[in-house]
Image (spheres, rainbow, N blue to C red):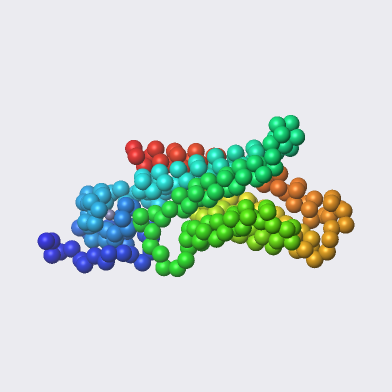
């Protein structure tokens, strides 16, 4: 055993991005192994991780996704693909629901069941998209874990809503309000988590567009909640007479279009990073 190597802590306190080297060519700052999170401090760049045998030099190339663990980036890609396909199918069903019901004579229950199935598949995609990076070191609850906690909580309103279809209308309002609050939190936290990943993407600048989407959807959900609370307290006078509803509808169309385009292009960027991790 090499006695000159300093004792290696098994985990490091935080993620180091650009490690430094001492005069003998050993890593002199904390640097996590991209594959297992082991602290590579004290090792040479040409060596291998003592924990998982991955090449040390692979972990010293920077924080970008293209240098991350290929299996983890593959999981992100599968997750965002699953999520985007489910969201797009749900969007197409919602847009064509009038045609499906009146021309194709589909029962409204079938449309709702299809939308719920899309929601379940999109939650599964989001679960894969928030898989932990092997080198992740957790000191406190982070965005990724918060999104996963909300996915588990999100299954409850999904079941509640499915069951509430048979219930009297009085049960629908509270169930719909809980689903709106959880859905809003899940969307906003997912966008913030995606923004954190986007910073590590070397191509197009997604960071700004994710910030715009967080603000846009934030305002949208505040308007929706105001509307739901007002409806619960006072019966609506006229269906289109409320400024909040009109503003929410006007916001919804550009927000959904920008979100879909961003999701599709971000999926392509992760796919490109995945190809680069394997090269
Ligand atoms: Zn390792």
Q: Residue 22 lies in what quarter of the image?
A: bottom left
Image quadrant occupied by the N terminus:
bottom left
- Residue 77 image point, x, y percent: 45, 43
Q: Residue at x 71, y 34 (%)?
A: 105
Give the residue furthest to the left: 1
Along the line of sight, which residue is nearer the eye, 140 or 176?
Answer: 176
Q: How many marks on residues?
A: 0
- Say left or right for 138 vs 207: left
| Residue 258 point in image, percent of width and height | 64, 43
Query: Percent position (x, y) of residue 87?
Result: 59, 43
Left or right of residue 121: residue 135: left
Whereabouts is ligand 1, in terms of quadrant?
bottom left
Q: Residue at x 36, y 67 (%)?
A: 13
Instruction: Tell me the residue at 68%/54% (across/down).
Output: 166
- The image position of residue 189, as x and y in percent, is 56, 57
Task: Work out whether residue 79 or residue 118 is closer to the camera in this orientation and state it.
Answer: 118
256 with respect to 207 (left or right): right
* Residue found at x 47% / y 61%: 145
**Which one is in front, 278 or 224?**
224
Above or below 58: residue 145: below
Can the viewer see residue 60 in this picture? no
Q: Which image quarter is the C terminus in?
A: top left
Among the 4 quarters of the image, the one containing residue 161:
bottom right
Q: Is residue 116 visible?
A: yes
């Amino acid at each position: 055993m090499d006695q000159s190597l300093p004792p290696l802590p098994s985990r490091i306190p935080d993620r180091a991005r650009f490690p430094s080297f001492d005069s003998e060519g050993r890593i002199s700052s904390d640097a996590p192994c991209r594959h297992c999170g082991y602290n590579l401090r004290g090792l040479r760049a040409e060596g291998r991780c003592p924990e998982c045998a991955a090449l040390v030099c692979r972990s010293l190339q920077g924080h970008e996704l293209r240098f991350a663990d290929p299996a983890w980036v593959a999981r992100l890609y599968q997750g965002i693909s699953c999520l985007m396909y489910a969201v797009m199918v749900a969007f197409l069903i919602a847009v064509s629901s009038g045609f499906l019901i009146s021309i194709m004579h589909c029962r409204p229950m079938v449309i709702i069941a299809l939308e719920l199935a899309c929601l379940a598949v999109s939650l599964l995609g989001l679960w894969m998209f928030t898989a932990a990076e092997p080198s992740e070191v957790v000191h406190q609850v982070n965005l990724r874990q918060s999104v996963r906690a909300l996915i588990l909580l999100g299954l409850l309103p999904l079941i509640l809503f499915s069951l509430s279809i048979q219930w009297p209308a009085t049960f629908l309002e509270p169930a719909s309000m809980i689903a709106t609050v959880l859905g809003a939190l899940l969307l906003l936290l997912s966008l913030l988590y995606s923004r954190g990943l986007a910073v590590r993407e070397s191509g197009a600048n997604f960071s700004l567009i994710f910030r715009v989407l967080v603000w846009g959807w934030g305002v949208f959900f505040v308007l929706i909640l105001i509307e739901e609370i007002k409806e619960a307290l006072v019966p609506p006078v006229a269906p289109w007479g409320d400024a909040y509803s009109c503003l929410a509808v006007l916001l919804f169309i550009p927000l959904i279009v920008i979100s879909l385009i961003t999701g599709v292009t971000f999926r392509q960027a992760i796919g490109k990073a995945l190809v680069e991790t394997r090269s």
